[in-house]
Image: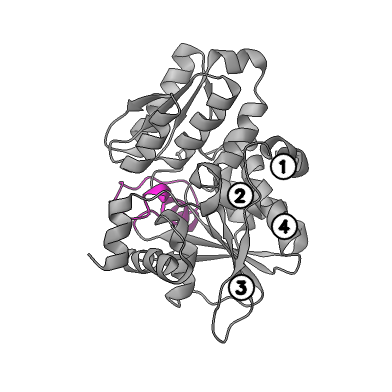
Amino acid sequence: MTGNLDFTGALARVRPHAWRTPVIPLDLPGGPPACMKLESLQHTGSFKVRGAANRLHKLSAQEREAGVVAASSGNHGRAVATVAARLGTPATICVPDWVDPSKLRAIRATGARVVMAGPSYDEAEERARTMAETAGMALVHAFDDPDVIEGQGTLGVELARQLPDVEEVIVPLSGGGLAAGVGLALRDRGVRLVAVSARRARVMFRSLETGHPIELPDEETIASALSGGIGLDNRLTFAICGSVIDEHVVVEESDIRAAVARAFREHRLVVEGGGAVGLAALWSGRYRPQGPAAVIVSGGNVDRSLLKDLVTGG
């Protein structure tokens, strides 16, 4: 499968829906040059629009007319719903009950149908899968799909053009779609891929440690975008992540909270918890780059009241 991915073609499909996000310097005293790749400023507020756009554009006209369904903790659902609305495709988004209120509002604003599927992400995923099978809709998986992985990989292509001398990329790790796509897009360039997991959302990390996909209970975390399982029947991202990730880092809730607040205070950036884990790894000292590095700030969809509490110390 990986040999058939066309990241250049995907970039052409994705470009009408996804902006070329900026990179800005990140000061690491005593360390190598570093930059932030600001997918937090992306259309829909996260990198997820890349994979969603590539997947929907590769559907047939008949499939788009029948509609799409997706399970999401927020960002993927918003991306799918937004692209579907632009293409005139009916969309249904299944979310867990704990979905971030700001993300839920954004999904509903697109006109998509929202299904509150229960207390866990896995229940949302099962509901979406069942609806796809019974209603004839195309399932747009959040990560374990070659078209979605291909779309996320456009971030790596874009980053390589912006920073041709980059030697390390630091990426958030959840279901593995972003890490898989970026890792595959950059593997021929000799770039090291460092994956950062939140302590309370580390199913892929623990699965790779164990040697096979496992399940963990959902835990409350500020990095809710990284929550959810990878599927015991994971077809793609588990194996790809095992081959492209060079190093793993796990950060604590306190590290992530501090990173979200610091990003706002020092850089005037609105970053959600899941999008800030790479910054958390660097600013906490849990990881030190060995060469010119880029950290992917993957999302900026955070509830205003939560952001205010973090910034003010409330």
Dot 3, how many residues are within 10 Å of its Cα: few (below 14), some (14-19), or many (20+)?
many
Image height check: is 10 above or below 187? above
Task: Confirm whether the magenta stretch covers residue 147.
Answer: no
The residue indicated by pointer 2 is 180
Labelled pair 1, 3 in contact (Cβ < 8 Å):
no
The residue indicated by pointer 1 is 11
* Residue 159 rendering spot, x and y as whole percentages: 68, 57
Earlier residue among tags 2 and 3? 3
For the N terminus, the quadrant is top right
Query: Is residue 233 something that shows in the picture?
Result: no
Q: CA distance from mark 4 to mark 1?
A: 17 Å
Helix, strand or loop status at disc 2: helix
Q: Residue at x 67, y 18 (%)?
A: 60
Earlier residue among tags 2 and 4? 2
Helix, strand or loop status at disc 3: strand
Q: CA distance from mark 2 to mark 4?
A: 10 Å
Labelled pair 4, 1 in contact (Cβ < 8 Å):
no
* Residue 237 rendering spot, x and y as whole percentages: 57, 45
Q: Which is in the foreground here, disc 2 or disc 3?
A: 3
Q: CA distance from mark 1 to mark 3?
A: 25 Å
Q: Which is in the foreground here, disc 3 or disc 4?
A: 3
Q: Which is in the foreground here, disc 4 or disc 1?
A: 1
Q: Residue at x 67, y 27 (%)?
A: 58
The residue indicated by pointer 3 is 34
The residue indicated by pointer 4 is 187
Identify which amino acid the numbered label 4 is placed on: Arg
